[in-house]
Image: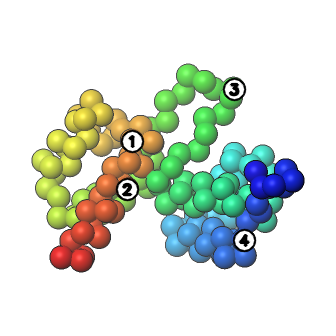
């Protein structure tokens, strides 16, 4: 929190980025508002704090996961179809072989991409994005 107990509210640039990221992923407005509601308890983009806006963007991009609702503590959230598709695309763009990727996910004790948890898939996406950038610079 900022001094005086006020929360830093979303910036106009973040508002634009939330909408642009959602549209870029082909996400419906209803789905976006559901994500915002899970993170902030409200359905309005403009009601988000800066930190919540960053979380919303990360969730849309598959780099973070939505918090598990308190009424379902035993749910294990597996990687979403969008995350799995992004991993496959990034694997090719990072020039990783299937074997390299499988060796990497073995550290999570998984033998299949479909068995990755959402948070693990987010980490894999992050690593593959870094590897892709390394290739682009080289």
Q: Position of residue 27 (x, y in %)?
A: 58, 64
In the image, 74: left or right of 10? left
Which residue is located at x 68 percent, y 29 percent?
70
The residue singled out by tag 3 in the image is: 71
| Secondary structure type for disc 4 | loop
**Residue 126 falls in image quadrant:** bottom left
Residue at 51% over, 49% down: 64
Q: CA distance from mark 3 to mark 4?
A: 32 Å
Residue 113 in the figure: left or right of residue 38 = left
Q: Residues within 10 Å of mark 1 (few under 14, many from 20)?
A: some
* In the rendered image, the vertical position of residue 44 relative to residue 116, given as above or below: below
**Counting residues from the N terminus, which is met first, the one under dot 3 or under dot 4?**
4
Q: Residue at x 76, y 60 (%)?
A: 8
Disc 3 to disc 2, how far (Cα)? 29 Å
State the CA–CA distance, disc 4 to disc 2. Answer: 25 Å
Q: CA distance from mark 1 to mark 3?
A: 23 Å
Query: How far is disc 4 from disc 1 in space, using C-alphas?
Result: 29 Å
């Amino acid at each position: 929190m900022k001094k005086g107990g006020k929360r830093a509210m979303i910036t106009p640039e973040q508002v634009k980025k939330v909408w642009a990221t959602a549209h870029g992923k082909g996400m419906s407005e209803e789905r976006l508002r559901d994500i915002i509601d899970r993170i902030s308890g409200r359905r309005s983009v403009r009601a988000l704090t800066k930190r919540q806006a960053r979380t919303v963007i990360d969730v849309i991009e598959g780099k973070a996961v939505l918090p598990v609702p308190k009424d379902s503590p035993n749910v294990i959230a597996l990687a979403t179809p969008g995350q799995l598709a992004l991993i496959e695309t990034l694997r090719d763009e990072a020039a990783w072989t299937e074997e390299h990727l499988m060796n990497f996910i073995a550290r999570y004790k998984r033998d299949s991409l479909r068995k990755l948890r959402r948070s693990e898939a987010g980490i894999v996406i992050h690593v593959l994005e870094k590897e892709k950038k390394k290739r682009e610079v080289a």
